[in-house]
Amino acid sequence: LRITAKDRVGHVHAFEASLKTPAFKDLPAIYAGSETKFVDREQACIDIDHYIKSCIKEERSADGKFSMLGTAGMPGIGKTALLLHAARNLPKVEGHQMKSLYFSFSGLQGGFSIYNEMRSATHNVGDAFGRALVSVVLHNPPNLDEKTLAQCIQMLCNIAGCSLVIFIDEIGQLDTESSTKLLKLLLHEMDAQHGRVVFIFSHLQKEMLMRQVSESGRSVQSLTLPALSIENWRDVLPTDWVDAAVSDSGVNQLVLSCMGHPRCLTDGLKEAAKESNHLLKNPSLASLNTARMTIVRTCRLDTDLSHLANSWFDVCSTVSEVVKRVQAKNLLVSLPVKSGDQFHFLHPLALQAWALKDTSLLASHLTQAYDADAVLAPSNEKSAEAILYNYEAVLRAACTESFTLGKFYGTKHIDNQLSSMVVTVKAPNATSLVVPVKTFENNFAQTLEFLTAGFIVVSENTTEPGIEYLSPYFDAKGNLVIAAVQCRCIVGSTLGWGTIKAGIRAAMRQFDIEAIKWFPVVYTTSSQRTIRRETYAGSVFFTESDLFVFTQKMGALRLHTTKFDSNDSDEKHWLRNCLQQQESLTPT
C-alpha cells in the first residue's frame, strides 16, 4: 500500500505500508518427530462425521439443546490423532461449507500457556479461552482486549465465511471447576450459533467428561478409545521391528506388552531403539528391561503402583472399584471384544517397570513371571511352569484375607466343594515365596516342612513324575491343604485326563499315608470348550480359555500366543486375531 502526505510546508512525501489481515494457520502435525500412525479408528470417524452432520443440520433435542460429543482415553491412546484426522477430513454436507479449527490444552501450539496468559487478564474462563483460541488459530490476530467469548467466535466465523468445526483437545488439563464452566459456556455458544459452530472435545476421563456436561441436562456421546486391535501392530511398526519380533522371543514379548497402545508402539519403541544398539538383534535381558523403562517414561506411564498392584492382583478385591482406580491413574488400557465389549488391563509395561524397581515379594515374583514368559517356546514346558508358580506367588503376596479356592483359580472346571472351600495362605519371612527341591522323591520331610511354612515347593527334576510343584493352603481349622500341580502346556499334545490324574495320585502317595489333604490342579492349553464334570471331580482343571482368564491380569503373554492352539473367538476377539498370525510370528 502506497500512501502520500504533505508536511507543514507543503512538501509531498510517499510512504510504503502493509495492511496485514488475519488469516488462519494450518492445522498442526500430531507431534514434531512423532512416528504415530492413524489406524484402526474407522468407527470413531464414522461417529464423528455423523455428529458433525447432525449439528450442521440443526438436529437438536426436544429442549432445543445440541448434544455433546467427546473422545476419552488414557494418554497416548490416540485422542489427538483422531481429532486431527477428523479435522482434516470433514464430512460433506450439501448446501454447507465448513472449516475446521484445532486448539490443544496439552503441548501443541502452546495453547495452554496462551490460555493462562489470557486468564490472568480476565476472571471469565470463557473470554480467556476465546482470546486464546483466536491467538492460536490466526496469523496476525487483532487486538483482543475486552473481547468476549461470543465476540471471538463471531470474529472467526466472519473471517472463515462458513461454518466452523472446532476441535478442543485435552480440556481435562484444566482444573475441574474451570473445565466444567468452559464446557457449559461453549455448548451454550453452540446453541446460540444455530449449528454454525460445532465443538468436539477430548478428555482423559470419560466419567468426568460425562458428569461435567450431563448436569446441564444435555445428552452426551462419549467415544472411549480402546487400544488398537493387536493384529494391527504389523501395520504400525517399522520393518526392522517386525523382523525382530518374529526372530526374538524377548522383543516379541515387548511388542505384546505394548497392548496395542499407539504411542508405546510408535514413539516408545523408537526411543527404546535409540538407547540400545542391540535391542533389535539378540537383546540381553538388561537391554529389554531398559527398553521397558524408556517406553514407560516416553509414554507417561511411569508411576508408583505399590498399593494399586496389590489391589489389582488381590482375588478378594472388587473388580469394578479397582478398574476405576486404574483408570484414575490413566493406566487402564482396554481391548475390544467381538461382542462389542472390552477387556480392561492395567498396562503391563507400567506393571513391569514398577516391578523392576520395587523390592516387594509381589514385584519380585511378577518380574520372574514376565522373565519366564519372555523365553517361552512351544516345546518348553519348564518356562510355562515358572510363569504359573510365580504368578500364583503374586496372587498370594497380594492376598489380605481369606478367600475361596473358586475365587483364586477362577476356572469353571472346579469341583463344587473345592470351589466353596475357604482358605488362607501364610506369608513366610523370606525373600521368595517359592523354594526348589532337587526332586520330590526321597525329600518328603523337607518338602512338608516348606509347605507347612507357607512356601510353594518346586521340583528341579525335569522328569519329575506326576507333578511339577506343590502349593500350600490352610483351611478354616488351620489344617494344611495342598494343591498338587501338573502343567500340560505343549502345543498339539494329546491329553489323557485319566492318565494325568493317575500320575498325580501316584506322586502324592506319601501325603495320603500321612493323611494330609490334597487336590489336583491341572493347567493345560487344551482347546476343549468343556470337560465332563466327572473328569474334574475333586480337582481343578484348566483349558486354554480358563488359563487365559486366570493369567490375564498380567496382560497379553507369549503363554497365550505361543502355547494356545486356538481361542474362544467370541470372548477373546483381540487374542484370536493375534493367534491367526502365530504361524509366521512364533519366535524361534
Image (spheres, rainbow, N blue to C red):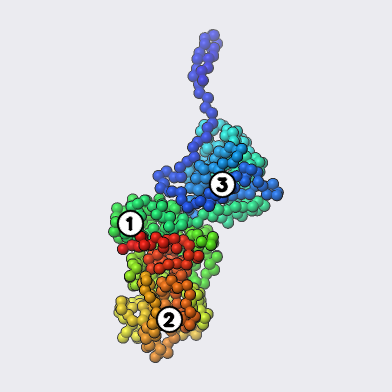
Q: Compared with residue 208, is residue 552 higher up or lower down, i.e. above or below? A: below
Which residue is under mark 3? 49
Q: Secondary structure at mark 2?
A: strand
What's the residue at 46%, 45% (across, down)? 30
Picture coordinates of residue 308 (x, y %)?
A: 48, 64
Which residue is under mark 1? 244
What's the residue at 51%, 20% (across, down)? 1
User: Looking at the image, is mark 2 or mark 3 nearer the viewer?
Assistant: 3
Picture coordinates of residue 554 (x, y %)?
A: 43, 65
Q: Compared with residue 174, is residue 283 higher up or lower down, i.e. above or below? A: below
Query: Quick one: label 2, few (<14), some, or many (20+) residues within 10 Å?
Result: many
Q: For marks 2 and 1, give the CA distance.
A: 40 Å
Residue nearest the viewer, comparing 336 with 362: 336
**576 left or right of 10?**
left
Residue type at mark 2 is: Pro
Which residue is under mark 2? 520
What's the residue at 57%, 33% (across, down)? 159
Residue nearest the viewer, comparing 406 with 121: 406
Q: Compared with residue 341, is residue 118 higher up or lower down, i.e. above or below? A: above
| Mark closer to the chain start, 2 or 3 | 3
Query: Quick one: label 3, few (<14), some, or many (20+) residues within 10 Å?
Result: some
Q: For marks 2 and 3, give the CA distance.
A: 56 Å
What's the residue at 52%, 37% (across, down)? 137
Residue 116 seen by the camera: no
| Mark closer to the chain start, 1 or 3 | 3
| Mark closer to the chain start, 2 or 1 | 1
Residue type at mark 3 is: Asp
Q: Secondary structure at mark 1?
A: helix
Seen as rendered, the residue at the extreme bottom is 513
CB within 8 Å, label 1 to label 3: no
Residue type at mark 1 is: Ala
Query: Quick one: label 1, few (<14), some, or many (20+) residues within 10 Å?
Result: many
